[in-house]
Image (cartoon, rainbow, N blue to C red):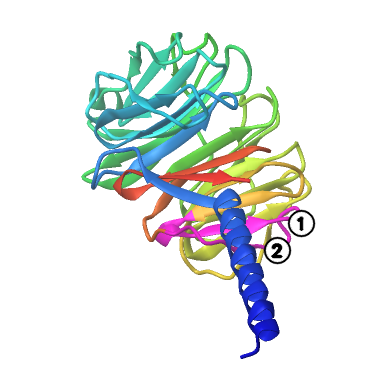
Amino acid sequence: MTQKCEKRWRLTLAALLFLATVAQAATAQDGWIRTRRGEENKDLNAVFFADQKRGWIAGDNGFVSRTEDGGRSWSQQPVETNEAINDIYFRSRDEGYFLAANRIFSTRNGGEQWREISRFSPEEFGGAELELYSIRFSGKKKGWVVGSVSKRDVVVDSLLIYTEDGGASWLRQRAPSREELIHVDFTSDQRGWAVGASGTILHTEDGGRSWTLQRSGTNATLYHVDFRNERVGWVVGERGTILRTTDGGESWFPVAVPVRSTLLSVQFASEDEGWIVGRGGTILRSDDSGKTWLRQESHTKQNLYALFIDKKNGWAVGGDGTVLQYAR
């Protein structure tokens, strides 16, 4: 090899190494990064951020952890339950709630202290067991919880309860379906949706005074609903089910996806950008308002149970204490 050729070869090699380094850095900066923040062999079932800095994750054995620096560090918070926490939700930086089995807990100081505010005993429901799955507030004082009523591990009725005094007291609202209800979402104090087993979608237009069934066109269990506004929304569920509506749920249309795994959570960061997580480490992304979805690399095979996404950051949590952070 001549001296000139050798010099050219070295320059080419250096350029390739530089491009590889840039590509590697770009991948590290724009993708999902996995860590373990929960307990080994235990599930994390919920994640919620009140703003860019303050967020919470929660899961099995009453595990709750908080970050105040955007996820760089986390501190576990003491709570008086060993039950699995199914959902955690904050109305502000300081006022939050979580659901564990048949109990509702609340904090008024960002999780420094949590206290039980309501418990539903089996005696109130003829000896049946209750499981509370999802909590959302539609206004300053009015909130909703959905779940199931079971006897000997068989679901016998749906559960739909509400508060009008900020959680001090809760009342049951009869739903037009006895199927298990798993998730609830409101876009205003008047309009809300709840989804659950056997393709169930419930809708209210009067602040929950009445609920009606919407035609989903599927018998698949539906695990999560997300509405961007009063007309545009998505539902996800088992066997790769994604449903989309542009008329407030008057009609729902299935969306083709590249997976058949069960999908457990959906959220849109903007009108165009949406994300879905599910079993087996499944992550899907859409950049066209949910019309099409592409699979993303999650670097894990753990089930991903919950998702929180905004314009700058994303978080997903799941099995074996898994926490995924999306860095743009």
Residue nearest the observer in this picture, 73 or 20 = 20
Give the residue displayed 62% in from the left and 24% down from the top. Answer: 209
- Residue 73: give x, y in percent of width and height: 41, 29
Disc 1: CA contacts within 10 A as few (<14), some (14-19) or many (>=20): few
Residue 35 occupies quadrant = top left
Give the residue displayed 54% in from the left and 52% down from the top. Answer: 28
Circle number at residue 299: none
Give the residue displayed 28% in from the left and 19% down from the top. Answer: 79
Left/right of residue 205 with respect to residue 175 in the rendered view: right
Circle number at residue 288: 1
Q: Is residue 300 visible?
A: yes
Q: Secondary structure at mark 1?
A: loop
Residue nearest the observer in this picture, 237 or 75 = 75
- Residue 27: give x, y in percent of width and height: 58, 57
Q: Give the amino acid at mark 2.
A: Thr
Q: Is residue 178 visible?
A: no
The reply to whether callout 2 and callout 1 are in contact (CB within 8 Å) is yes
Measured Cα–Cα span from mark 2 to mark 1: 7 Å
Give the residue displayed 59% in from the left and 49% down from the top. Answer: 29
Q: Which residues are magenta?
A: 278-299
Residue 74 occupies quadrant = top left
Q: Give the amino acid at mark 1.
A: Asp
Residue that carries the numbered disc 2 in the rendered image: 292
- Residue 144: give x, y in percent of width and height: 52, 25
Q: Is residue 47 above or below residue 91?
A: below
